[in-house]
Image (spheres, grey):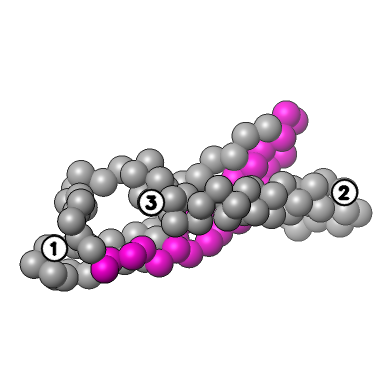
Amino acid sequence: MSYIWNTQEIEVYNNYEEQVDVVYKVNYSITKTDNNGNAETLFKVANINTSSLDNFIAYEDLTSEIVIDWIKADLETDGVTALENEVETALSTMLNTSTRTL
């Protein structure tokens, strides 16, 4: 079973601190899939710290992996583990309930 982190939507400041398209908010998802192909996805929002643009990366050079790394660094290990546990619990609940949404 694995966790897949993805960016869904990125919000930017048009102009900020002499830079353009500065990321300040990211809508992202975490998906957990079991060995039978059952999956559950959580959608979250992260506010990106823009207090220092010393290591600024131009928007056109950003990848989902870079942005997810920012989010995980901000969450730290405990936060990442907590979100992965949350999606795992949601998947378990979905699989062990007597009803479902179609």
Q: Which residue is mark 2?
A: 96
Q: Which residue is mark 3?
A: 70
Q: Which residue is mark 1?
A: 20
Outermost left residue: 18
Task: Report the number of discs.
Answer: 3
Residue at 53% in and 61% down? 44
Residue at 76% in and 51% down? 89
Quadrant (top left/top right/bottom left/bottom right) for the N terminus:
top right
Q: CA distance from mark 3 to mark 2?
A: 34 Å
Mark 1 or mark 2, which has the lower sequence index?
1
Q: CA distance from mark 1 to mark 2?
A: 48 Å
Residue 65, placed above or below residue 79: above
Q: Which of the two discs, 1 and 3, sits closer to the camera?
A: 3
Dominant secondary structure, magenta: strand
Check contact, mark 1 vs mark 3: CB within 8 A: no
Q: CA distance from mark 1 to mark 3?
A: 19 Å
Q: Which residues are magenta?
A: 27-51
Q: Is residue 88 left or right of residue 48?
A: right
